[in-house]
Amino acid sequence: MREVLHPRKINQVVSMATLPPPVDVNSNPYLTGCFEAVTNEGVWPNLTATTGELPADIVGTYIRNGPNPRFTPIGSYVYPVDGDGMVHAITLSDGVAVYRNKFVRTPMLKREEEVGHALWGGIMSGVVPGEEEAGPALANQWKDLPDINVVRHHGKLIALAEMSRSYSLGDKLETLDPVTYGGVFAQGTCAHPKVDPMTGEMIVFTYGLEAPFLTWAVIGADGQVTSGPHAVDTPKSCMIHDFAITATSIVLVVNPLIFDLEAAMSGGSLLSWKPELGCRIAVISRKTGAVTWHQGDAFWTWHFANAHDVDGGLVVDAVVWDRPGFGEHDDHTPSKGTFSRLTLPRISDAINHQILVDRPMEFPRIDDRLIGQVHHQVAVGARTGREVPPGEFDAVLTINPESGSVTAFDAGTLSVGEPCFVPSSDGSTGGYYVTYATDRTTMRSSFVVLAADDVAAGPVATIELPVRVPLGLHGAWLPI
């Protein structure tokens, strides 16, 4: 027996007598090609540069998370909010690399491995297994999906989910325990926490289907919750993927991607895009918790590059879309992200929106040592204009947000992932951007190293990997 369940609404279930059908893998672009899942895990040592030479001042590990279904999905599959987590790590030292990958093995995934097929449906199907299939401990629970991001904080490496429990990982990427901060976040936090490099604090937020719909909190450098959770006054439950901080403020953008339980219970979409409701941005004082609101037209942002204080207010740099691209009322016409600067003045509730670079892009990143501070460069994955599959990027751009100037690495037949900044280990001001990439013509993957001050020059080094790394989501650089 199976039951239909909506996230965090355990009391609203409808029985189903049969499994939902498997998703047609061949018709979903995020289950084929460069996104096709891999199931083999392992460790591959003694890798050296295939082209160029690995810089001597890169010492550490690049680790990246991403959705990678262990079994054929059932019911639905919506990228990027579905799929089991798999982490991919490459450790560099003395010109030699070690690559390893491993699933984030939640209790739900372990149960599916025991039976040999998927038991939990995609998030839009709302299907969870009953006791007969999942056992009493997991019956009627939503599946943990720590497949979005990774962060290292208070000495722990954590695989992060979109509003389900995160899990700590060991030195060999083995899955350890759920991370709930003593039960304060029993159902998890956001997938994009912000670690303030000046204080060591990690700021998180949560959203939910029941009031309070939005909260934020501060986790100290020792891993203890030091402030919150604090509720933010919002009248509806909205999906919020990312946020930003400055030295003084927390910035939460509330755009109208609304959870609609009534529609979902009657066969409609769990998420509805309601642009007529506009945008509200909460600017929250990190010192007092006081909230001021800014109002404007609706837009959607998956990811923020950074924010910082300026005279008279603050600025936020982000990739901005006209809509999220899924959910009810999305007409599925082509959309693109633009690199934009949002200025929020302290003397009014306005949102001043300036487009700096108008071309398809996503995954903005800065040097993480500047989170909340002034930054002078943002790197993104972008499209050159050639025909590439949905969700893929064939270029890495670096953008100067003050001037809007762009430097581009044209990756040719490579589909590149999120660029991650790697500071030089010798203490100099130089650095690099690294990413996993897959050749669309051969399906072979590589690790690419670009000089941050001149990505247009092409890779200073590449390592051809012995196995394919599916395109995924977010990563982090972990200095040794």
Image (spheres, rainbow, N blue to C red):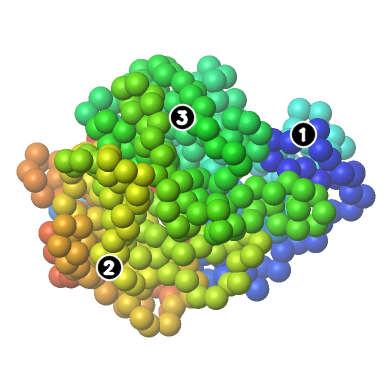
Amino acid on which disc 3 is placed: Trp
Viewer-nearest residue: 147 or 40? 147
| Three-letter code for the amino acid on which mark 1 is drawn | Ile
Residue count near mark 1 (Cα–Cα under 10 Å), binned few <14, some 14–19, many ≥20: few
- Lower position in the chain sequence, tag 2 or tag 1: 1
Q: Which residue lies at the image location 50% right of the left edge and 31% below the top edge?
A: 232
Q: Residue furthest right?
A: 17
Q: Are marks 3 and 1 in contact (CB under 8 Å)?
A: no
Check disc 1 and report the residue beneath it. 10
Is residue 92 among the parts visible in the rendering? no
Name the quarter where the N terminus is drawn: top right
Return the x and y of residue 142 as percentages of the image width and height: 70, 39
Q: Indicate the position of residue 167 as horizontal and vertical percent values.
A: 52, 33
Residue 222 numbered mark, or none: none
> Of the residues tagged 3 and 1, which is closer to the observer?
3
Residue at 12% x, 59% y is 453
- Give the spatial CA distance, label 2 vs label 1: 44 Å
The answer to whether residue 244 of the structure is visible from this angle is yes
Whether label 2 touches label 1, CB < 8 Å: no
